[in-house]
Image (tube, rainbow, N blue to C red):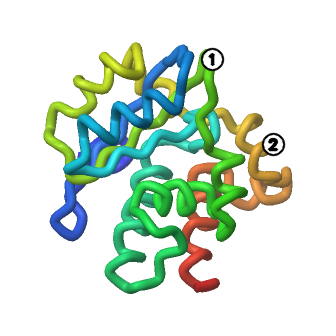
Amino acid sequence: MNPKNKTSEEIDLKRIQIAGFKSDLTDFKEVMEELKLQYSDCVIQLMDADAVAGVQHVLNSTIHAIKSFSRNENIASDVGLEICVRTSGQRQISQASKLLGISNGKINICAVAVDCKSDIMENLVNILGLRDDGVLEPDTEKLKSIYNISDIQLETNLDISKILMEKTALLIIDT
């Protein structure tokens, strides 16, 4: 199977699922409370899909997040927030939240589920709205702006997903 097409992965005996949603949220805090209540047995992290560079970027970041806990090198206190930190390539939780945070209104959401039941993404449709994995496709110009990526960086590596995965990997060195 081509790794770019994977939406689920088993890492360290953890099941990872990633999906995109087109949402129109009126009360994000209520959505998060509902998710915590209904899915307390697994991890669900929601991020702004416009700030992710595809499924491979998020999968890579999620793997790094999970492994950081097994090495006691986690930055955040919970796996969900660690996924956000690793995806952003930032050490500061507040900066990661600024880059990937969810707000009310029309928004594209990247949902990451760890150790949830296999039908979790179908169930999230009832909470988040229309499932559309297309929102996970990277928009290079938008990502350049969000992450301050220069034209020179893109000239040396044409794949913005790889540039952002490199930022994630560099967090390990900084630990």
Q: Is residue 168 above or below residue 5?
A: below
Residue in view at x 67 percent, y 50 percent? 158
Point 31% across, 51% down: residue: 43
- Left or right placement of residue 109 versus residue 6 in this view: right
- The residue closer to the viewer here, 161 or 28, is 28
Picture quadrant where residue 167 is located:
bottom right
**Image location of residue 39, percent across then percent down:** 24, 41
Q: Which residue is mark 2?
A: 145
Residue 73 location in percent, x, y? 47, 83
What residue is shown at x 43% (from left), y 28% (from top)?
31
Q: Which residue is mark 1?
A: 105
Query: Going by the image, does 148 lie left or right of 12?
Result: right
Q: Is residue 6 visible?
A: no
Q: Is residue 36 left or right of residue 82?
A: left
Q: Secondary structure at mark 1?
A: strand
* Amino acid type indicated by mark 1: Gly
